[in-house]
Amino acid sequence: MKIRDHAGITDPGRKRRRNEDSFVMDPPLFVVADGMGGAQAGEVASRLAAAAFREYHEADDLDAERRVEAIIQEANRRIFERARDDTAVSGMGTTVTAALVHGDGVAIGHVGDSRAYLVRDSQLEQLTQDHSLVADLMRSGRLSPEEADTHPQRSVITRALGTDPEVDVDTFTVKARPDDVFLICSDGLTTMVGDEEILGLFRDGGNLDAVAKALVKAANRHGGDDNVTVVLFSVGDGEAALEETARMTVDGQGETSDLEDTLTGLEAPAAAREVPSSEATTQVGWEPIAPRPSKPPKKRGRRRLVAVVIALAFVALLLLVAFWGLANAHFVGAEPDGRVAVYQGLPYDVGGGVSLYRARYISTFHAAQLAREERVALFDHDLTSYDAARERLARFEDEGLP
Ligand code: CA
């Protein structure tokens, strides 16, 4: 099987100042890495992963799957050691999803929530399983796919390169057929653009370069909340259509789409801290919704007036209960960088960047450092008191994590 065409593009999106994604397009090898961590740490992590792949060489006599796994382990070691030795990047990590074409097969190696897809016979098939909190919760039946799409912690991953000396890597091989197209992407695409729309952009056709650009544009059109990276390659019988097999590694700032990068700046703090209540109002989006003024009662209506007063009182009571709930309810969740946190409020995003909760306490340990059962138990989103939520975290903090 030959590689017919390939294309890669990365874009910071519309909300983030930095691009923490990296990709490698070095046929027969294709990689996407999505870094995370405060300040510049995420970029460092994803670039270290890309560098490890860049140094891959074919002379290696391991079979393809084991070769991909070996490179991922090597990348993990480098990131882990750098994070351990350099306090400026401690806690950094990255996802990695890699594909290596060999003979009739495509060997995939995968850690985190970047994804590999196969487009075949006008169908889009997700090849990788996310290592993420919401994927855990879905597998255990606690969350429907629809709930997962809007879950406050949908970006929290449970496996990453850089958090431990060894990493558990998913590897498998897909038997390729002529005209297969493979897509590797960061979650900045898949959290913004649904499967149907992704497939539609493939159907609209064009060469892979055009499809890649269209995918990034779609992510930005839907908000561009995150960095978005797309790597595509197609396979076929016979000779490679492209002579050019130049290596290409892009760390963050590849071609940008023509959409503006608006910044909100959201680097996370590094240490456990109480969030001062003065920050509360800036982070919380719960505005009271004023009840629609009802029409003034006319002559007919003392009875009507009474009904209106009762209705208003009921609405006021509901608002009171809602505010009481927001003020007193707490749940355990995780920050975008994976650190476990206690949130005040209710675990819902209501859209438009408005949430019904705010972080009140941010711990030092990461969701990825817990066993799966522990995560599922801890992130049940049951509402509880602040003290009780802190107590649930204390057990893990006492164990000396990280
Ligand atoms: Ca991302």
Image: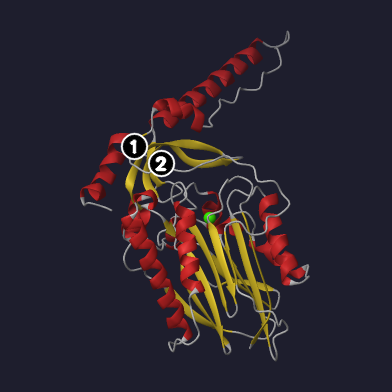
Q: Amino acid at mark 1?
A: Arg
Does residue 21 appear in this view?
A: yes
Viewer-proximal residue among 1 and 47: 47
Disc 2 to disc 1: CB gap under 8 Å: yes
Name the side, left or right, on which 112 lies relative to 352.
left
Q: How many numbered discs?
A: 2
The circle on residue 273 is 1
Residue 64 x %, y %:
48, 84
Q: Is residue 302 left or right of residue 163?
A: right
Quarter-of-image position of residue 389: top left
Residue at x-position 65% and y-position 15%: 304
> x%, y% of residue 123?
67, 73
Dot 2, how many residues are within 10 Å of its Cα: few (below 14), some (14-19), or many (20+)? Answer: few
Q: Is residue 53 above or below residue 114?
A: below
The verdict on label 1 being within 8 Å of ligand 1 is no
Q: Residue furthest top?
A: 299
**Is disc 2 placed on a helix, strand or loop?**
loop
The disc placed on residue 71 is: none
Residue under label 2: 269
Residue 219, horizontal then vertical, whole percent: 66, 54
Amino acid type, mark 2: Pro
Residue 163 in sight from this viewpoint: no
Of residues 164 and 318, the one nearer the viewer is: 164
Q: Residue at x 28, y 35 (%)?
A: 387
Q: Residue at x 45, y 38 (%)?
A: 346
Question: For numbered disc 1, what is the local secondary structure?
Answer: strand
State which mark lies toward you, 2 or 1: 2
Identity of the residue drawn at 62% across and 68% down: 231
